[in-house]
Image: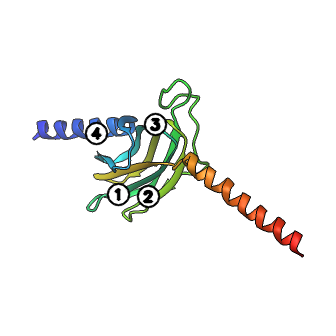
Protein backbone atom coordinates (compact mmCIF):
# COMPACT_ATOMS: atom_id res chain seq x y z
CA UNK A 1 0.00 0.00 0.00
CA UNK A 2 2.80 2.37 0.97
CA UNK A 3 4.63 1.62 -2.29
CA UNK A 4 1.53 2.54 -4.32
CA UNK A 5 1.23 5.85 -2.47
CA UNK A 6 4.90 6.66 -3.04
CA UNK A 7 4.59 5.75 -6.74
CA UNK A 8 1.47 7.92 -7.11
CA UNK A 9 3.14 10.88 -5.38
CA UNK A 10 6.23 10.45 -7.56
CA UNK A 11 4.12 10.32 -10.72
CA UNK A 12 2.18 13.46 -9.75
CA UNK A 13 5.38 15.32 -8.85
CA UNK A 14 6.97 14.32 -12.16
CA UNK A 15 3.84 15.42 -14.05
CA UNK A 16 3.76 18.80 -12.30
CA UNK A 17 7.49 19.37 -12.90
CA UNK A 18 7.33 18.51 -16.58
CA UNK A 19 4.10 20.45 -17.17
CA UNK A 20 5.72 23.68 -15.97
CA UNK A 21 8.66 23.37 -18.35
CA UNK A 22 8.40 24.89 -21.82
CA UNK A 23 8.49 22.35 -24.62
CA UNK A 24 9.32 23.18 -28.21
CA UNK A 25 8.11 21.28 -31.28
CA UNK A 26 8.64 22.05 -34.96
CA UNK A 27 5.83 22.40 -37.50
CA UNK A 28 8.39 22.74 -40.32
CA UNK A 29 7.81 24.96 -43.35
CA UNK A 30 4.15 25.93 -43.54
CA UNK A 31 2.37 25.40 -46.86
CA UNK A 32 -1.29 25.50 -47.95
CA UNK A 33 -1.63 22.03 -46.42
CA UNK A 34 -2.81 22.16 -42.81
CA UNK A 35 -0.14 21.14 -40.31
CA UNK A 36 -1.36 19.96 -36.91
CA UNK A 37 0.26 19.22 -33.60
CA UNK A 38 -0.82 19.28 -30.00
CA UNK A 39 -0.03 18.44 -26.45
CA UNK A 40 -1.39 16.36 -23.60
CA UNK A 41 -1.05 17.73 -20.09
CA UNK A 42 -1.58 16.11 -16.71
CA UNK A 43 -2.65 19.47 -15.33
CA UNK A 44 -0.94 22.68 -14.35
CA UNK A 45 0.89 25.26 -16.40
CA UNK A 46 1.10 24.88 -20.19
CA UNK A 47 4.01 26.75 -21.76
CA UNK A 48 4.65 25.24 -25.21
CA UNK A 49 6.33 26.59 -28.34
CA UNK A 50 5.73 25.42 -31.92
CA UNK A 51 8.30 26.69 -34.42
CA UNK A 52 7.62 27.15 -38.13
CA UNK A 53 9.19 28.73 -41.19
CA UNK A 54 7.61 30.75 -43.98
CA UNK A 55 9.62 30.65 -47.21
CA UNK A 56 7.68 33.57 -48.79
CA UNK A 57 5.34 36.32 -47.63
CA UNK A 58 2.18 34.45 -46.70
CA UNK A 59 -1.35 34.65 -45.41
CA UNK A 60 -1.41 32.30 -42.44
CA UNK A 61 -4.43 30.70 -40.80
CA UNK A 62 -4.03 29.34 -37.28
CA UNK A 63 -6.25 27.72 -34.70
CA UNK A 64 -5.79 26.28 -31.20
CA UNK A 65 -8.64 24.24 -29.71
CA UNK A 66 -9.11 22.45 -26.40
CA UNK A 67 -10.02 18.85 -27.25
CA UNK A 68 -13.37 17.45 -26.07
CA UNK A 69 -13.26 15.56 -22.78
CA UNK A 70 -10.41 17.69 -21.43
CA UNK A 71 -10.48 19.31 -18.04
CA UNK A 72 -10.98 23.06 -18.05
CA UNK A 73 -8.03 24.87 -19.63
CA UNK A 74 -8.50 28.47 -18.63
CA UNK A 75 -7.02 31.04 -19.06
CA UNK A 76 -5.73 29.93 -22.46
CA UNK A 77 -3.80 32.11 -24.92
CA UNK A 78 -1.53 31.73 -27.91
CA UNK A 79 0.52 34.26 -29.83
CA UNK A 80 2.85 34.44 -32.81
CA UNK A 81 6.46 35.52 -32.23
CA UNK A 82 9.50 36.01 -34.44
CA UNK A 83 12.43 33.78 -33.60
CA UNK A 84 14.69 36.86 -33.66
CA UNK A 85 17.90 37.45 -35.54
CA UNK A 86 19.62 34.49 -33.91
CA UNK A 87 16.66 32.10 -34.57
CA UNK A 88 16.67 30.96 -30.93
CA UNK A 89 13.16 30.48 -29.51
CA UNK A 90 12.47 32.27 -26.24
CA UNK A 91 15.52 34.55 -26.44
CA UNK A 92 15.58 38.26 -25.56
CA UNK A 93 15.39 39.37 -29.22
CA UNK A 94 12.04 37.63 -29.88
CA UNK A 95 9.16 39.98 -30.66
CA UNK A 96 5.41 39.41 -30.64
CA UNK A 97 4.18 39.74 -34.23
CA UNK A 98 0.87 41.19 -33.08
CA UNK A 99 0.33 43.19 -29.90
CA UNK A 100 -2.38 40.87 -28.59
CA UNK A 101 -2.60 37.15 -28.01
CA UNK A 102 -5.52 35.03 -29.15
CA UNK A 103 -7.78 33.24 -26.66
CA UNK A 104 -8.67 29.61 -27.28
CA UNK A 105 -11.24 27.19 -25.90
CA UNK A 106 -13.30 24.19 -27.01
CA UNK A 107 -14.84 26.39 -29.72
CA UNK A 108 -12.77 26.35 -32.89
CA UNK A 109 -11.89 29.86 -34.09
CA UNK A 110 -9.53 30.48 -37.02
CA UNK A 111 -7.28 33.54 -36.98
CA UNK A 112 -5.86 34.98 -40.22
CA UNK A 113 -2.60 36.94 -40.27
CA UNK A 114 -0.24 38.16 -43.01
CA UNK A 115 3.42 37.46 -42.28
CA UNK A 116 6.70 38.06 -44.12
CA UNK A 117 9.10 35.22 -44.91
CA UNK A 118 11.09 34.14 -41.85
CA UNK A 119 11.27 32.01 -38.72
CA UNK A 120 8.39 32.21 -36.25
CA UNK A 121 6.83 30.30 -33.39
CA UNK A 122 3.47 29.90 -31.70
CA UNK A 123 3.62 30.32 -27.92
CA UNK A 124 0.80 28.49 -26.16
CA UNK A 125 0.32 29.58 -22.55
CA UNK A 126 -2.51 28.23 -20.42
CA UNK A 127 -3.49 26.69 -17.12
CA UNK A 128 -5.09 23.23 -17.05
CA UNK A 129 -7.25 22.32 -14.05
CA UNK A 130 -6.66 18.61 -14.66
CA UNK A 131 -5.79 16.16 -17.44
CA UNK A 132 -6.42 17.69 -20.83
CA UNK A 133 -5.24 18.12 -24.37
CA UNK A 134 -5.23 20.78 -27.02
CA UNK A 135 -4.61 20.85 -30.74
CA UNK A 136 -2.88 23.52 -32.81
CA UNK A 137 -3.25 23.72 -36.58
CA UNK A 138 -1.86 26.16 -39.13
CA UNK A 139 -1.53 26.64 -42.87
CA UNK A 140 0.07 29.33 -45.03
CA UNK A 141 -0.69 30.47 -48.56
CA UNK A 142 1.78 32.61 -50.47
CA UNK A 143 0.67 36.19 -51.04
CA UNK A 144 -0.05 36.57 -54.76
CA UNK A 145 2.48 38.67 -56.69
CA UNK A 146 1.18 40.33 -59.88
CA UNK A 147 2.71 39.14 -63.16
CA UNK A 148 4.41 41.72 -65.45
CA UNK A 149 1.52 41.31 -67.88
CA UNK A 150 -0.82 42.65 -65.19
CA UNK A 151 1.17 45.88 -64.99
CA UNK A 152 1.26 46.15 -68.80
CA UNK A 153 -2.55 45.86 -68.94
CA UNK A 154 -2.86 48.50 -66.21
CA UNK A 155 -0.66 50.96 -68.13
CA UNK A 156 -2.49 50.23 -71.40
CA UNK A 157 -5.87 50.80 -69.73
CA UNK A 158 -4.73 54.10 -68.23
CA UNK A 159 -3.42 55.13 -71.66
CA UNK A 160 -6.79 54.41 -73.31
CA UNK A 161 -8.62 56.39 -70.61
CA UNK A 162 -6.22 59.31 -71.13
CA UNK A 163 -6.66 59.15 -74.92
CA UNK A 164 -10.47 59.14 -74.66
CA UNK A 165 -10.40 62.06 -72.19
CA UNK A 166 -8.15 64.14 -74.47
CA UNK A 167 -10.41 63.45 -77.51
CA UNK A 168 -13.48 64.51 -75.55
CA UNK A 169 -11.73 67.71 -74.48
CA UNK A 170 -10.81 68.51 -78.14
CA UNK A 171 -14.32 67.79 -79.43
CA UNK A 172 -15.98 70.03 -76.83
Marks 1 and 2 in Cβ contact (< 8 Å): yes
Q: Marks 3 and 1, how far apart in space? A: 29 Å
Q: Position of residue 39 (x, y in %)?
A: 31, 45
Please rate how many residues cluster around mark 3, counting C-alpha atoms within 10 Å: few if below 14, some from 14 to 19, many from 20: some
Q: Quadrant of the N terminus?
A: top left
Residue at point 90%, 76% (across, down): 172
State the residue in front, 122 or 139: 139
Mark 3 and mark 2 lie on one chain; the one further toward the N terminus is 3
- Choose mark 3 or mark 2, whichever is in front: 3
Ranked by sequence position, the earlier of labels 4 and 1 is 4
Determine the image quadrant of residue 157.
Answer: bottom right
Q: Is label 3 in a helix, a strand or a loop?
A: loop
Q: Residue 104 bears which disc, if any?
A: 2
Q: Tell me the distance, in whole angstroms, between the alpha carbons under discs 4 and 1.
A: 19 Å
Give the alpha-carbon distance from disc 4 to disc 2, as whole Å.
Answer: 23 Å
Residue 51: where, in percent of width, then height?
A: 41, 37
Q: Rounded to the nearest whole Å, what is the CA distance between mark 3 and mark 2?
A: 27 Å
- Does residue 77 appear to the left or right of 153 in the view shown? left
Question: Residue 10: image x %, image y %?
Answer: 23, 35
Can you tell which quarter of the image residue 97 is in? top right
The residue pinned by badge 4 equals 15
Residue drawn at (52%, 40%) of the image? 81
Q: Nearer the viewer, mark 3 or mark 1?
A: 3
User: Observer-nearest residue: 68 or 149?
Assistant: 149
Figure check: 73 above or below 85: below
Identify the residue under disc 1: 66
Q: Residues within 10 Å of mark 2 (few under 14, many from 20)?
A: many
Please name the residue that numbered disc 3 is placed on.
Answer: 55
Amino acid sequence: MKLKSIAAIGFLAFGAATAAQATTASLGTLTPLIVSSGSFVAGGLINDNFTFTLSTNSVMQSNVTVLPGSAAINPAFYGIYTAGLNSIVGDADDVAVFPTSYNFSTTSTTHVDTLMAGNYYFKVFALANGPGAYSISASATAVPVPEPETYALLVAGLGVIGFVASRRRRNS
